[in-house]
Image (tube, rainbow, N blue to C red):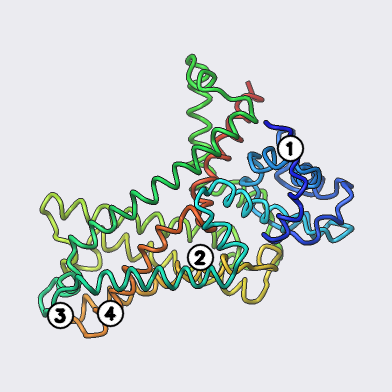
Amino acid sequence: MSSVANLDLMSDLRKFGATEVNACFSCGNCTATCPLADNDAAFPRRFIRLAQVGLEDELVASKELWTCYQCGLCTTKCPTEADPAEFMATARRYAIQRYDKTGLARLMYTKPWAAVVVAVIGVVLFGLFFVSLRGTQSVTELALFDFIPYPVIHTTGIVVMVVLAVFALIGAVSLARDMAKKEGVTWTSLWADKESRGRTGKALWYAVGIESIGQKRFREDCADDDPVDPLHRRRWLIHALTLWGFLGLFVATALDYGLDVVGIKPTGTLVPLYYPTRLLGTVAGLALMYGVTWFMINRYRHHGTAAKESKASDWLFLILLWLTGFTGFVIEVALYVPPAPAWGYWVFLIHVAIAMELLLFVPFTKFAHVMYRPIALFFYGLAKEKSAA
């Protein structure tokens, strides 16, 4: 990695949230306390030091930024109240804007009102676009999908996904390249022989199955801020339900589209609640709403270290997720109330507009964690496999 120092790094980081980190004198309490610190991951003292000396390239390419779950133990044990947990969150925000080539992420993280304006304008533009192409308010079984024709939604969704994929790939590939260089990983070392391919496969399973979906270290190693919290308020469970809910809705939507393509069930057809895709979507939506609602409650109450400081971008992300889930359930009610009530058409319009914007914002908001964390977990899993060999 480059060793050129960015002398303005600390002052720039403060714009993203870290205001107390200069109080750190590298005592090591945070690393000694952190349940994720091991021979290959010195949380978070080394990364504070990287920021203090201006080694930006090495900081943003550190896998530990994304394998940290901000449990807050380091902050509670810090003798100078430097708030290392908030520093790690700040460094992740900084890394997101670093790998975003449009400048939108930086705007949304450092200009709160601008972030709100951008979000509102985005929803309005999507809404106006769909209104301009709307159909009639029919009383058929597919009423809502007559109002905004499904081909319009489908085509717009494809365009949004293509734009999302372009910016997501630029950021993800850039991070993976920098992280590989920092970790000394090459393409040859990943696939050269049977042994290396085995390590690579295990690292992929660790990143996707064990950690991203299974939340193993979050559950077992990252203690919650308040040990008396009941299970239903545990951060790992709230995080997991939000993630599983979003993935479940994505899968249900994809399956519903597939059934439409092969002619089994046209999109929007009224089916029993126990129909597989409908049941999956309902359960996933409930999981998403539960997780996001508790995240918002905790942030509002400043419950726990991770929720002590909230950026406008944090609230924006949660509000968009919550509104997407809530309007989705309202639409489900409208589908089962024949004929479709008048308000159902406009809720459907709002739902589609917000969902499109939420997808479009993936590379520029906290949603980018879904892109970057699995990459970091892969390199962490690879390092574990190498050390165990």
Count residues near mark 4 (Cα–Cα under 10 Å), then give few for <14, some for 14-19, many for 20+: some
SS class of the residue under badge 2?
helix
292 lies above or below 385: below
Label 1 or label 3, whichever lies nearer to me, is 3
Disc number placed over residue 317 in the picture, else none: 2
Amino acid found under the numbered disc labelled 1:
Asp
In 3D space, how far apart are the residues under numbered discs 1 and 3 (Cα atoms)?
61 Å
Looking at the rendering, in which quadrant would you find the N terminus? Answer: top right
In 3D space, how far apart are the residues under numbered discs 2 and 1 (Cα atoms)?
32 Å
Residue 238 lies, in percent from the top left, at 54, 62
In 3D space, how far apart are the residues under numbered discs 2 and 4 (Cα atoms)?
22 Å
- Residue tagged by mark 1? 38
Count residues near mark 2 (Cα–Cα under 10 Å), then give few for <14, some for 14-19, many for 20+: some
Residue 349 lies, in percent from the top left, at 29, 74
- Residue tagged by mark 4? 346
SS class of the residue under badge 1?
loop
Q: Are marks 1 and 3 in contact (CB under 8 Å)?
A: no
Residue 93 picture quarter: bottom right
Closer to the N terminus: mark 3 or mark 2?
3
Amino acid found under the numbered disc labelled 3:
Gln
The residue depicted at 80 percent of the width and 56 percent of the height is: 21
In 3D space, how far apart are the residues under numbered discs 3 and 2 (Cα atoms)?
32 Å
SS class of the residue under badge 4?
helix
The residue depicted at 40 percent of the width and 58 percent of the height is: 359
Amino acid found under the numbered disc labelled 4:
Trp
- Residue tagged by mark 3? 137
Examine the rendering and report whether any part of residue 247 can be seen. yes
